[in-house]
Image (cartoon, rainbow, N blue to C red):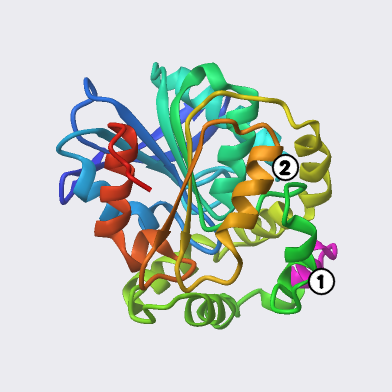
């Protein structure tokens, strides 16, 4: 275990898979687990964790296959959610608040549908959910070119191996409103987390699994877990469309929040605001 700025780091064994987990706060407090998106690692939530650790037990992982976490067999979000559930059992944690950004948000959605009894509440940030409106509209957006490219077997690995910094900078610079929010040091850390062939393939496999995710998410199973959906004010897309799609999918208790002066990378562009919104949601004081 190492410790930096009161955030500890551990490698834990989950069914033979070693997973890197960052954690802070008192384990007797309500647990909040953060799932990062692409192309990032656990550090995207570091600022949010530091603002919540005095009140909550905060945990974030490198998703399987990324950074210091070993890979699992599939990139579909059903399997990722199952893995997260197994991890929570290994940690002896019950009734969590689950927060997912981007691909982590897709995984959080699958977890909500599979394991609602394990959740106190859940937060989905800055993402579209495969198979849930307005998913088809999102896929048709020409600016979302990488969805189709990443689904091609082997080609993206060949094109982007060794060029991760160029690729990742495109997303940080294009999708963020606060262009300096993800600084050079953190960008270097993210590139390092995706630098080997396993991590690179893992990240593309998340996209290759979208058709599988669409089928899994087509069931529209009703759940009563309170869910908060967050988007950046400067992020493309109408939050009301996303809210309508989530409600039609069976999310009955849904709240939504736009984060001002924020693009796609909410946890880093506006960590103080995101932390406060999560805090208000957990204690039932979120007003809008």
Confirm whether residue 223 shows in the render. Answer: yes
Which mark is first along the chain, 1 or 2? Answer: 2
Q: Which mark is residue 136?
A: none
Residue sitting at x 56%, y 82%? 170
Quick check: 112 left or right of 264? right
State the image quarter where residue 115 is shown.
Answer: top right
Mark 1 packing: few (<14 Cα in 10 Å), some, or many (20+)?
few
- In the image, residue 46 sits, relative to residue 22, either above or below, namely below
Please state the horizontal and vertical placement of residue 268, each as a whole percent of the image: 35, 64
Q: Which residue is mark 1?
A: 155
Please state the horizontal and vertical placement of residue 135, each as a whole percent of the image: 74, 56
Mark in the foreground, 2 or 1: 2
Q: Main secondary structure of the magenta part?
A: helix
Q: Element at badge 1?
A: helix
Q: Reply yes or no: does residue 152 show up in magenta.
A: yes
Q: Which residue is mark 2?
A: 76
Please state the horizontal and vertical placement of residue 66, each as a whole percent of the image: 54, 52
Residue sitting at x 72%, y 26%? 221
Residue sitting at x 66%, y 53%? 202
Confirm whether residue 65 shows in the render. Answer: no
Quick check: 192 left or right of 283? right
Task: Identify which residue, 26 or 178, lies in the foreground.
Answer: 178
The magenta segment: 148-157
- In the image, residue 190 sits, relative to residue 167, either above or below, namely above
Q: Element at badge 2?
A: loop
State the image quarter where residue 54 is shown.
Answer: top left
Q: Reply yes or no: does residue 209 show up in magenta.
A: no
């Amino acid at each position: 275990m190492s410790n930096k700025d009161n955030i500890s780091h551990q490698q834990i064994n989950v069914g033979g898979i070693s997973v890197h987990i960052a954690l802070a706060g008192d384990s007797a407090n309500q647990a909040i687990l953060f799932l990062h998106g692409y192309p990032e690692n656990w550090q995207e939530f570091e600022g949010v964790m530091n603002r919540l650790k005095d009140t909550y037990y905060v945990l974030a992982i490198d998703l399987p296959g990324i950074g210091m976490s070993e890979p699992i067999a599939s990139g579909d979000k059903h399997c990722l959610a199952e893995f997260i559930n197994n991890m929570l059992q290994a940690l002896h944690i019950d009734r969590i608040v689950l927060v997912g950004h981007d691909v982590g948000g897709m995984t959080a959605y699958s977890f909500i549908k599979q394991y609602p009894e394990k959740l106190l509440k859940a937060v989905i940030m800055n993402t579209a959910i495969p198979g849930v409106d307005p998913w088809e509209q999102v896929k048709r957006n020409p600016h979302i070119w990488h969805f189709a490219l990443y689904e091609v077997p082997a080609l993206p690995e060949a094109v982007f191996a060794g060029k991760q910094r160029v690729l990742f900078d495109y997303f940080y610079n294009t999708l963020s409103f606060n262009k300096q929010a993800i600084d050079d040091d953190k960008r270097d850390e993210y590139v390092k987390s995706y630098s080997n062939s396993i991590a690179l393939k893992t990240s593309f496999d998340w996209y290759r699994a979208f058709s599988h995710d669409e089928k899994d998410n087509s069931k529209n199973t009703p759940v009563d877990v309170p869910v908060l959906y967050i988007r950046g004010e400067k992020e493309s897309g109408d939050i009301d469309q996303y809210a309508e799609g989530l409600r039609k999918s069976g999310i009955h208790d849904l709240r939504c929040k736009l984060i001002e002066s924020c693009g796609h990378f909410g946890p880093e562009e506006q960590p103080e605001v995101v932390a406060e919104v999560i805090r208000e949601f957990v204690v039932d004081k979120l007003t809008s």
